[in-house]
Image (cartoon, rainbow, N blue to C red):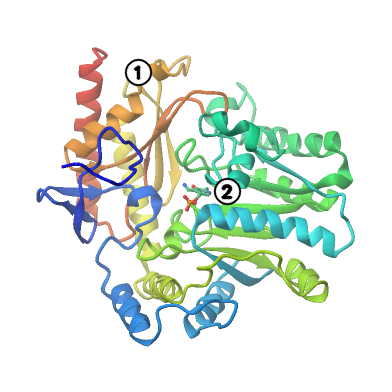
Amino acid sequence: MKSHVLHRNSLTPPPRAVSGDGIYITDAQGKRYLDACGGAAVSCLGHSDPAVRAAMHAQIDQIAYAHSGFFSSDAMEELADDLVAHAPEGIAKAYFVSGGSEAIEASLKMARQYFLEIGQPDRKYVIARRQSYHGNTLGALSVGGNMWRRQQFEPLLINASHIAPCYAYRDQLAGETDVAYGLRVANELEAAILELGAGSVAAFVAEPVVGATSGAVAPVPGYFKRIREICDQYGVLLILDEVMCGMGRTGTLHAIEQEGISGDLQTIAKGLGAGYQPIGAVLVSQKIDDAIASGSGFFQHGHTYQGHATACAAALAAQRTIRERDLLTNVVKQGELLADGLHDRFGQHPFVGDIRGRGLFRGVELVADRETKEVFDPARKINAKIKKAAFARGLMAYPMGGTIDGVRGDHVLFAPPFIVTEDDVAKIIDLFELAMNNVFTAEGLS
Ligand code: PMP
């Protein structure tokens, strides 16, 4: 049947999802798929959560939407109260948007406006990391280090500098301790600030646990402490992008809690609304809120759907459900089972170089050679083939790769809903193994 949707892949439209139950999605042919990646680390409560659905119905019955230029709503106020009450230290406000890229755009503009408010108009540069993804709108794409996504849009992007990621599997030197490695790569930030001119850098942006470019790469101990120190020393704002790794995904509500620091701005999305509604937010620290409130009193930004009441109601119900059902305990427990299972099954696999991550955010890096860590020829499209083979067997796993500059190698990301059971985890690993065997056999590599 001809589709008039401009799909991501115009040659092969995907099957139509017609229903969801728990961690499963059913398509129009009646085939069921186990969602082992929450789409893109979004669906943290599965696809049929009764509390979130009820909250959305109740909100729609009252009022679905009222423009934020005219009204606030109970849902938006209560969601902000809830987020600030559970936020990292120093966070005072929540600014609502409709997704991750919008959250990054808003945080970049807020950083710039902050410096105007405090009389430092020269601060305009943003530093970020290679092997990072911050979204697909032009500002977010500019700070992201994914060259494959950037390439054709380079002429439209704003200036941003990129330093090394914290990616121990690839970049830690032989004999170098974790701490020494973390300091070495964090210090690249200081060098970049000095090169651009200490008074001209506005912000540094980083994902606490890297998601969409390298599959759940957590920092080494001490890395983010040193980053925080450098930002403080040079008056640079720290923007933490927790769009993918946040809202419980790594076992703590915020991934950065595990690093013992907090950011000046923090973006969240995906798990915030658990996929029931499109919503994201920027968590704003007291000093930035104060500067804007006592300065122009007005953040020069805005979107039509910001603070959408139904989206806020869904997110509030999702966050309350996660707490009431103590689901972060399950994230930690099932996350360990998933990690153990992946290690048991693939720890010695000839084409698995690294298995990593935190909580229910786990990545598998595929390599052509375990010893040299040589990547597969990108033309082989190993990660895409694994996605396809897994999907054919009813498993959703999130592939990524590219091997162009900022992205090295093939990765598969697992980010299942927080409600998974031990049996579900075992099934994910079994289906993944079948998909891996299919692909490596077909490639003549087994
Ligand atoms: N930041 C990070 C860390 C992300 O993983 C993503 C999405 N994968 C984004 C930003 C962009 O979010 P969205 O797709 O909702 O615009």
Q: Is residue 196 left or right of residue 205?
A: right
Query: Is residue 289 left or right of 80 when viewed as pictured?
Result: right
- The residue lying toward the viewer, choosing from 141 and 248, is 141
Three-letter code for the amino acid on which mark 1 is drawn: Arg
Confirm if mark 2 falls within 8 A of ligand 1: no
| Quadrant position of residue 297 | bottom right
Work out whether mark 2 precedes mark 1 in sequence or the reverse, and give the earlier one.
Answer: 2
Residue under label 1, please give it.
380
Disc 2 from disc 1: Cα separation: 30 Å
- Taking 129 as reference, is 441 above or below it? above
Looking at the picture, how far across and down is residue 188, in whole percent? Answer: 74, 34
Tag 1 secondary structure = helix
Instruction: Answer whether residue 72 is visible to the viewer in this image.
Output: yes
State the residue at coordinates (46%, 53%): 250
- Residue 72 occupies which quadrant of the picture? bottom right
Q: Nearer the viewer, mark 2 or mark 1?
A: 1
Q: Amino acid at mark 2?
A: Pro
355 with respect to 301 (left or right): left
In the depicted view, which residue is nearer to us: 100 or 344? 100
- Residue 95: x percent and y percent? 60, 68
- Along the viewing direction, whichever of 5 and 281 lies nearer the viewer: 5
Residue occupied by mark 2: 208
Q: Does the image show residue 360?
A: no
Q: Position of residue 10 (x, y in %)?
A: 31, 36
Nearest to the observer: residue 157 or residue 117: 157
